[in-house]
């Protein structure tokens, strides 16, 4: 069976219900509707989603900083946003990239950050609930060793997988070009291989902003 893919649309959504890294899977993005479901036998093929080529977009520049509340901010860097909540010294920040399906419903989120300033850096993925949790999510970047994120929990909003990131892994990710081919891979509850493209457009700038916010 083939792998069904959907397209990244990270610039079209922002912080809504909390921080993914801080929440630890407790609350965050509601994954609305069926996402990346394989077509059934005999069903006509689904129309190919429109994919925005990373190379066709201008260089990532931060959008104007927006303030939802005195202690909550969000800034956009390409397909990644840097979101912060709280006040120093308890202020927490993360960078997030989201993926939507063709129907413009949120399919998944990938976040990097620290639960507290002294906590280790973590990479957290949120996926729909129809997941085979015995197998990890894989962040596959062409030409490098895939990162495997074991599932930690599921709730009505989705299933959450995470790993701690060493600084050398972060440096490798920051060095990737914006157009670097990459994807998230997992299996649904029926064992069907699923995948969606990940974007590194704006990753380096977002990681730099995240580091400044969490010093």
Image (tube, grey):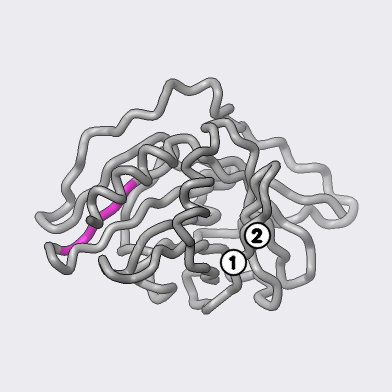
Expressed as whole percent of the image width and height from the top left, the position of residue 189 reads 72, 72
Expressed as whole percent of the image width and height from the top left, the position of residue 33 reads 56, 59
| Of the pair 191 and 42, the residue shown nearer to us | 191
Q: Residue at x 65, y 59 (%)?
A: 138
Q: Exactly how many numbered labels are in the figure? A: 2
- Of mark 2 and mark 1, the one earlier in the sequence is 2
CA gap, disc 2 and disc 1: 6 Å
Quarter of the figure with the C terminus: bottom left
Asked whether the residues under the numbered discs 2 and 1 touch, taking CB atoms below 8 Å apart as contact, a structural biologist would say yes
Q: Residue at x 72, y 37 (%)?
A: 47
The magenta segment is: 82-86
| Of the pair 101 and 3, the residue shown nearer to us | 3
Residue holding disc 1 = 149
Expressed as whole percent of the image width and height from the top left, the position of residue 36 reads 66, 53
Q: State yes or no: residue 83 in magenta.
A: yes
Q: Is residue 36 above or below residue 202?
A: below
Expressed as whole percent of the image width and height from the top left, the position of residue 154 reads 53, 77
Q: Is residue 39 above or below residue 174?
A: below
In the drawing, does residue 138 fall left or right of residue 52?
A: right
Q: Residue at x 36, y 38 (%)?
A: 205
Q: Is residue 27 above or below residue 38?
A: below
Mark sitting on residue 138: 2
């Amino acid at each position: 069976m083939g792998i069904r893919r959907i397209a990244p649309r990270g610039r079209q959504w922002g912080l809504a219900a909390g921080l993914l890294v801080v929440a630890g899977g407790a609350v965050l993005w509601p994954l609305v509707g069926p996402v990346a479901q394989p077509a059934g036998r005999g069903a006509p093929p689904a129309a190919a989603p429109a994919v925005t080529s990373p190379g066709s977009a201008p260089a990532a520049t931060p959008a104007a900083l927006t303030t939802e509340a005195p202690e909550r901010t969000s800034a956009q860097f390409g397909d990644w946003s840097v979101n912060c909540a709280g006040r120093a010294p308890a202020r927490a920040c993360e960078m997030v990239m989201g993926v939507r399906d063709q129907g413009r419903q949120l399919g998944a989120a990938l976040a990097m950050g620290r639960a507290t300033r002294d906590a280790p850096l973590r990479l957290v993925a949120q996926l729909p609930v129809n997941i085979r949790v015995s197998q990890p999510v894989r962040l596959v970047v062409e030409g490098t060793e895939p990162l495997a994120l074991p599932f930690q929990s599921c709730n009505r909003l989705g299933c959450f997988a995470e790993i701690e990131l060493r600084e050398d892994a972060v440096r490798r990710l920051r060095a990737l070009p914006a157009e670097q081919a990459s994807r998230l891979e997992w299996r649904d509850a029926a064992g069907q291989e699923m995948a969606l493209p990940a974007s590194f457009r704006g990753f380096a700038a977002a990681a730099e902003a995240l580091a400044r916010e969490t010093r």
